[in-house]
Image: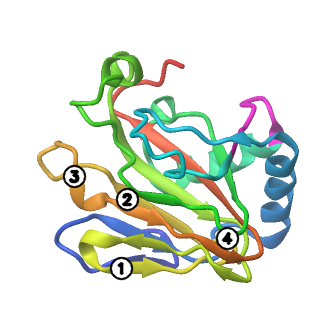
């Protein structure tokens, strides 16, 4: 809350912040170019039998890319979280009809691959997500448990704690990357872990 333009979403269930105009248009456009160049089909940690659960494409940013380094530095200054705990930056691209159905960003301790994904660096703590553009229609992010739908705005940042105050995973952070109905949606995502990231 000490940062300019930051608002906290009023909810006792989830710690969720919004900051408009975090990135300027030129930087958003450059990031979109990287995502278009390097995208691959998105995946999920624990397949659930639904082939259409996550239908976007993902870009894994190179940590040596000066563009990624600039954005990482901005996010780290904003959050004040130890940069060593951060996962590499990712971008996502959603074409018409693509979505990410309701999910949480933390890994379920009951998941079959929990040890594989969390054994060294621990679970995800904070999520930072940035909208890079505004699709022609659709593409909002809906937090179902708190009945809050956030519309894409170029350069807008969302940040939320995936845990409850006691440090346990918070199921109220379930959110839906809703279908794009026209145009294309681009977002950038940065996750932080309980311990230093070991890829």
The residue that disc 3 covers is 170
The residue that disc 4 covers is 155
Residue 183: x percent and y percent? 77, 75
Res 49 quadrant in image: top left
The residue tagged with tag 3: helix, strand or loop?
loop
The residue that disc 2 covers is 160
CA gap, disc 1 and disc 3 = 16 Å
Q: Residues within 10 Å of mark 4 (few under 14, many from 20)?
A: many
CA gap, disc 2 and disc 1 = 13 Å
State the residue at coordinates (49%, 18%).
198
- 90, 102: nearer the viewer: 102
Contact check, label 2 and label 1, Cβ < 8 Å: no
- 23, 180: nearer the viewer: 180
The residue tagged with tag 4: helix, strand or loop?
loop
Contact check, label 2 and label 4, Cβ < 8 Å: no
Residue 52 located left or right of residue 184: left
Q: Residues within 10 Å of mark 1 (few under 14, many from 20)?
A: some
State the residue at coordinates (57%, 61%).
99
Q: Residue 1, can we see it?
A: no
């Amino acid at each position: 809350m000490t940062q300019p333009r930051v608002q906290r979403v009023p909810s006792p269930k989830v710690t969720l912040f919004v900051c408009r105009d975090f990135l300027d248009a030129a930087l958003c456009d450059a990031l979109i170019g990287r995502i278009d160049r390097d995208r691959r089909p998105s995946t999920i940690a624990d397949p659930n039998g639904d082939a259409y659960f996550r239908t976007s494409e993902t870009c894994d940013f190179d940590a040596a890319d000066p563009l990624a380094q600039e954005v990482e530095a901005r996010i780290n200054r904003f959050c004040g979280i130890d940069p060593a705990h951060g996962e590499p930056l990712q971008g996502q691209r959603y074409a018409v009809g693509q979505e990410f159905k309701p999910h949480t960003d933390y890994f379920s301790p009951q998941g079959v691959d929990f040890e594989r994904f969390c054994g060294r660096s621990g679970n995800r703590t904070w999520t930072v997500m940035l909208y890079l553009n505004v699709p022609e229609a659709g593409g909002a992010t809906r937090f179902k448990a708190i009945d809050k739908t956030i519309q894409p705005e170029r350069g807008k940042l969302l940040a939320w704690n995936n845990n409850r105050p006691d440090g346990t995973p918070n199921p109220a952070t379930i959110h839906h990357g809703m279908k794009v109905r026209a145009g294309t949606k681009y977002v950038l995502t940065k996750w932080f872990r309980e311990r230093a990231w070991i890829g």
